[in-house]
Image: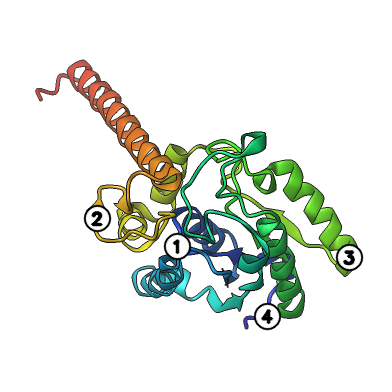
Amino acid sequence: MIMTSATDTALVLFSGGQDSTTCLAWALSCYSYVETIGFDYGQRHKAELRCRIDVLAKIRECFPAWASKLGEDHLIDFSVLGKITDSALTQKVAITMEAGNLPNTFVPGRNLLFMTIGAAIAYRRGLGVLVGGMCEIDFSGYPDCRDDTMKALQVVLNLGMDSHFIIKTPLMWIDKAETWQLANDLGGDRLVKLICEDTHTCYLNIRDELHPWGYGCGKCPACQLRRRGFDAWCDRKTVTQFISESQDGEKGKANGICC
């Protein structure tokens, strides 16, 4: 492990999905040293565990500047979570809406437990920043993805461990289209291509067809959110490009340039 200030080191909750990969790229752009942590909790979409390895390898291969900052990966056996929860993410049941307007894909306490275990490892490793892909804009209403939850958890973790952890959630206030844009800003076409081809989001564990936005069934809530965000991002790019080209054309005419 590279010796540096704790505030310049981070541990990223890294599932192998679009959001956590974008957060990993963000952390690698912001901090001098970054480690990752993932959890095998009996999830139905186990493809994400395989994708984690592929994504980390691709980042090391395709982004040399980031590779030098990317440290150890921690995969935690947390199968007990799948045994104590009743969720469509851990059992082969249809995805439906439950009482309280929450989908049955909600795994109670998941993010709270993941962040707590992450903090325990960060404490041992001397890492000062915990990074998660929680979002309160384009999300399924999970209460443990809310900004208030993360702020309260930061207080609890620091009190309980007598530490000074900072929880960062770079996606908290942006939608999925902006998440695609953030990935493009951080790593360009290479990172967008990596996210499309190597990350996994589909709740039903489908990876037999590559869509423009990535692999998946295209029907589950996670796939629909990812696809809508990608389509919206492409539409925004088209509009932005059209405006830019129009402005360039007007400048050319003003300068007497024939296009």
Residue in the picture at 64% in, 68% down: 83
Q: Depth-wise, is mark 4 or mark 1 nearer the camera?
A: 1
Residue 115 pos. (x, y %): 70, 62
Q: Earlier in the sequence, mark 4 or mark 3?
A: 4
Residue 10 in sight: no
* Mark 4: few/some/many CA within 10 Å (<14, 14-19, 20+): few
Q: Nearer the viewer, mark 4 or mark 3?
A: 3
Residue at mark 4: 3
Mark 3: amino acid: Gly
How far is mark 1 from mark 3, CA to CA?
33 Å
Q: Are dots 2 and 1 in contact, CB under 8 Å?
A: no
The residue located at (52%, 54%) in the rendering is 88
Q: On the image, numbered disc 3 is attached to which residue?
A: 160
Left or right placement of residue 172 versus residue 257 in this view: right
> Mark 2, residues whose alpha carbon is within 10 Å: few (<14), some, or many (≥20)?
few
Q: Looking at the picture, how far across and down is residue 102, in whole percent?
A: 61, 39
Secondary structure category for the residue under label 1:
loop
Residue at the disc numbered 2: 210
Q: Earlier in the sequence, mark 1 or mark 3?
A: 1
**Distance from label 4 to label 2 (Cα)?**
41 Å
Residue with the mark numbered 1: 45
Q: CA distance from mark 4 to mark 1?
A: 36 Å
Please, what is the three-letter code of the amino acid marked with disc 1? His
Depth check, mark 2 against mark 1: the one in front is 1
Badge 3: residue crowd in 10 Å (few <14, some 14–19, many ≥20): few
- Secondary structure under tag 4 reads loop
Quarter of the image where the C terminus is located = top left
Question: Looking at this view, is 105 or 155 the one in front?
Answer: 105
Please tell me which of labels 4 and 1 falls first in the chain.
4
Mark whose residue sits in front, 1 or 3: 1
- Whether 218 is drawn above or below 61: the answer is above
Which amino acid type is marked by label 2?
Leu
